Amino acid sequence: MGFLDLDKNFAFYASYHSNPINIAIHMIFVWPIFFTSVLIFNFIPTPFDLPRIAFSLFGNDVTLIFNFGFLLTLIYVVSYVYFDYKAGSLAAVLCIFCWIASGVLASLLGFQLVWKVVLVVQLISWTAQFIGHGLFERRAPALLDNILQAFLMAPFFVLFEALQIFFGYEPYPGFHDRVASMVDAETEYWRNKKAKLLL
């Protein structure tokens, strides 16, 4: 599978997310996982001094640091824009917003409160997604087959899927039909493999 092949990667993702309730759960909980991951990265020390932007917000001192959280965000931004310029640019804006908002929150709350927020959000979000797969999708999540899919591509794909469902977005004419046939083939392969294991 091409690492940044939109058609193949989206078909792979979609084959694990066909149930509407599971899709809705992912749309709600994937981005909070990304946000809180960037949030906790604000407290990981870097081996050297990095640029920072300091400003005041509502009378509080806020510092945005170009740290590991920024590096993580940059990887996501570049990947998403490469996937698809239009949807990827929107995803990139959301990623940058998450980095800025996480920096503000980290400055305002401090580590003692932030790690608790991160823990609660991560536990709720991951639990909800596993319930979505177990109860509604009845298929193990994609991260068990492709961990990169879960951590790098999932935020983009839930946004991409929302654009497709609510606005009929396609990066090129015929994308939906092409991917649907790839999903059907992938789902059929999975069903046959599952049937053989049950014999």
Image (cartoon, helix red, strand yellow):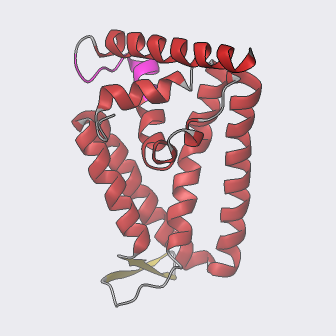
Quadrant location of the N terminus? top left
Magenta-colored stretch includes residue 165: yes
Residue at image position (73%, 49%) is 124
Q: Is residue 18 above or below residue 100?
A: above
User: To which quarter of the image does residue 11 belong?
Assistant: top left
Give the left or right position of residue 103, taking residue 25 as reference. left
Tell me the magenta residue range. Answer: 161-172
Give the left or right position of residue 134, taking residue 107 as reference. right
Give the left or right position of residue 187, taking residue 134 as reference. left
Residue at image position (41%, 12%) is 180
In terms of depth relative to the viewer, which is nearer, 86 or 123? Answer: 123
Residue at image position (67%, 47%) is 125
Q: Position of residue 8 (x, y in %)?
A: 35, 27
Magenta-colored stretch includes residue 169: yes
Asked if one can make out residue 163 in the rendered structure from this viewpoint, the answer is no
Asked if one can make out residue 18 in the rendered structure from this viewpoint, the answer is yes
Q: Position of residue 156 (x, y in %)?
A: 41, 40
Q: Is residue 119 above or below residue 186?
A: below
In terms of depth relative to the viewer, which is nearer, 174 or 118? Answer: 174
Q: Is residue 194 above or below residue 79?
A: above
Q: Position of residue 140 (x, y in %)?
A: 66, 32
In terms of depth relative to the viewer, which is nearer, 121 or 174? Answer: 174
Q: Position of residue 101 (x, y in %)?
A: 48, 63
Give the left or right position of residue 149, taking residue 89 as reference. right
Residue at image position (56%, 35%) is 27
User: To which quarter of the image does residue 143 belong?
Assistant: top right
Residue lying furthest front = 199
Q: Is residue 15 above or below residue 86?
A: above
Quadrant location of the C terminus? top right
